[in-house]
Image: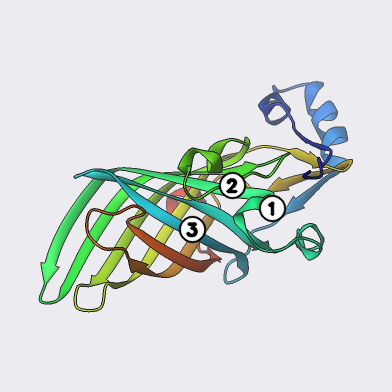
């Protein structure tokens, strides 16, 4: 039987504050929150996942985090696999463009990334929705470029995520918040495609680092 951790995703209302006395209430709440900062050049996380083709013009990628900087102790006692993952992600890409350059196929996508906290880890790569069964704790808009070597079926991925929301969550009585709105993450992954027509479409692994914010976010 899996151990059930004391994990609660706090209401997004914690993040919405009006001017006036409520600012004091927010300050009091934030005293107890451990903010996981995303700094430029810092390795933020390591991830493992798979992808599927939803339609000829859209896809999804999903998986779990095997490490998140600042939450190291939460990973120390668990095997690194999808069935024990406290933190998972699901990316949806409804917009897709493809270009060909010799043996290379270049796929550009735009979509959303959601990070989830799982009170009862139960990730299963045969069930993509299992990676978005938890409580959402961070969302972002993402632009992705995939470069596929059609001769070897190997590919590389570069994502740029800009965080649009992040919520306070609690694990064993400690409150955390992962990054803040407008933080930027750059993710690099390496993967291998499956045979055409089979699922998953491919497998990948990689890491994310903090990136410089765009000028309009300053």
Distance (Cα) linking label 1 and label 3: 14 Å
What residue is shown with label 2?
A: 123
Query: Could you tell me which residue is drawn at 12 percent across and 67 percent down?
Result: 100
Residue 41 percent across, percent down from the top left:
57, 72
Q: Residues within 10 Å of mark 3 (few under 14, many from 20)?
A: many
Q: Residues within 10 Å of mark 1 (few under 14, many from 20)?
A: some
Q: Seen from this angle, which residue lies furthest front?
A: 1
**Which image quadrant for residue 195?**
bottom left
The answer to whether residue 179 is seen in the rendering is: no
**144 w.r.t. 104: above or below:** above
What residue is shown with label 1?
A: 84
Q: Nearer the viewer, residue 101 or 48?
A: 48
Q: Is residue 172 left or right of residue 108?
A: right
What residue is shown with label 3?
A: 49
The answer to whether residue 184 is seen in the rendering is: yes
Query: Could you tell me which residue is drawn at 63 percent across and 47 percent down?
Result: 180
Residue 127: numbered disc: none
Mark in the foreground, 1 or 3:
1
Q: Quadrant of the N terminus?
A: top right
């Amino acid at each position: 039987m899996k151990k059930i951790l004391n994990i609660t995703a706090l209401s997004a209302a914690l993040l919405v504050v009006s001017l006036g006395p409520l600012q004091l209430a927010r300050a009091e709440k934030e005293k107890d929150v451990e903010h996981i900062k995303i700094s430029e050049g810092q390795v933020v996380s390591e991830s493992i996942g798979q992808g599927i083709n939803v339609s000829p013009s859209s896809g999804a990628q999903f998986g779990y985090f095997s490490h998140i900087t600042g939450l190291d102790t939460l990973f120390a006692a668990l095997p690194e696999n999808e069935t024990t993952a406290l933190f998972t992600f699901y990316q949806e890409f409804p917009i897709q463009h493809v270009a060909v350059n010799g043996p290379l196929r270049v796929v550009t996508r735009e979509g959303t990334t959601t990070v989830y906290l799982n009170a009862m880890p139960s990730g299963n790569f045969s069930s993509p929705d299992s990676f978005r069964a938890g409580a959402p704790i961070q969302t972002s808009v993402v632009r992705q470029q995939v470069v596929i070597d059609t001769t070897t079926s190997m590919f590389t991925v570069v994502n740029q995520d800009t965080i649009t929301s992040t919520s306070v969550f609690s694990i064993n009585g400690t409150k955390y918040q992962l990054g803040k709105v407008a933080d930027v993450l750059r993710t690099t992954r390496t993967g291998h495609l499956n045979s055409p027509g089979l699922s998953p479409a491919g497998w990948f692994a990689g890491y994310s680092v903090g990136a410089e914010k765009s000028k309009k976010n300053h």
